[in-house]
Image: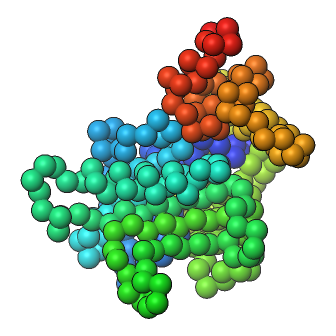
Amino acid sequence: MANYLDPKNDLTFKRVFGEHPDVLISFLNALMPFESERHIVEVEYLPAELVPENPAKKDSIVDVRCKDNFGRLFIVEMQIYWTEAFYNRIVFNAGKAYVRQLDSGEDYHLLQPVYTLSILNQNFDHKTEQFYHHYQIANRENTDEIIPGLEFVLVELPKFHPETIKERKLAVLWLRFLKEVNEKMRVLPTEMQENKYINKAAKLCEIGAFTPEELAAYERYWDSVSIEKTLVGGAFREGVIIGKSEVIVNGFKMGLSIENLTTLTDLTEEQITEILKQHNLL
């Protein structure tokens, strides 16, 4: 019987969706808010020079240029992390991706829309049980009037329950895959096995597909997530407002890497390095 690794881990998520276009196309067509007759037919992973320049860019896991059956090109960014600066970050990333499409002197009509798809393993909207959030730039008085360009889809995975979207069977299966597949699963449910793309994604998550070094990296990722939750959660539980310098110092002592700390504080690696040097930690 197969042992699976959790696809929400940074390592496995990139392995499944960042290296296999056929799997990613199935996933995106299931989750994106497209009209029924529209679907993605091609994806191209963006080269580094087209990825937005952002010191916290690790929060965007997969960046692709897509082509739909109407011949329209657009960019999708996928993220899975949540921070207090999340809204600012996704707008920043999408805006940079939008602007970077044009070279100097090219016409604006060449610009294609940018979609951000964020699968979040943490709830952020505690006012509603709705787990699927689709944002557009709309006229406040007449919401049917849309300015095309940027759209955001945020999915709160902990809120997802299969019975809430029975009409979208493929979306249900993909979200179940993300939510249910983990180290405790021994046998993939039959309905997931019957979908060739989800079955392929599950095989990519089998523990036997990873080297000892990759498995060590997998565990380090969960350790960093646990430390971040402990560090931030503890501060809020005690009602203490702590400065970023203290967060950096305490986090570094608890084992967080400089890369982890960029996500936690929204500072650059250079700023964090300077603070650690000031406290004689580097």
Q: Is residue 69 left or right of residue 221?
A: left
- Display colour scheme: rainbow
- Viewer-proximal residue, 63 or 215? 63
Q: Residue furthest right?
A: 238
Relative image position of residue 231 (x, y in whole percent): 79, 35
Picture residue at 74% right of the left edge, 76% below the top: 128
Picture residue at 51% right of the left edge, 51% below the top: 89
Picture residue at 65% right of the left edge, 43% below the top: 9
Query: Residue 192 sits in which quadrant?
Result: bottom right
Is 67 drawn above or below residue 231 in the view shown?
Answer: below
Q: Quadrant of the C terminus?
A: top right
Relative image position of residue 220 (x, y in whole percent): 70, 29
Q: Residue furthest left?
A: 105
Is 153 drawn above or below residue 78 in the view shown?
Answer: below
Q: Is residue 160 left or right of residue 116?
A: right
Q: Is residue 215 visible?
A: no
Is 37 drawn above or below residue 249 in the view shown?
Answer: below
- Viewer-proximal residue, 171 or 141? 141
Picture residue at 67% right of the left edge, 33% below the top: 244
Relative image position of residue 180 (x, y in whole percent): 74, 58
Relative image position of residue 127 (x, y in whole percent): 75, 73
Q: Is residue 254 visible?
A: yes
Q: How many marks?
A: 0
- Viewer-proximal residue, 169 or 36? 36
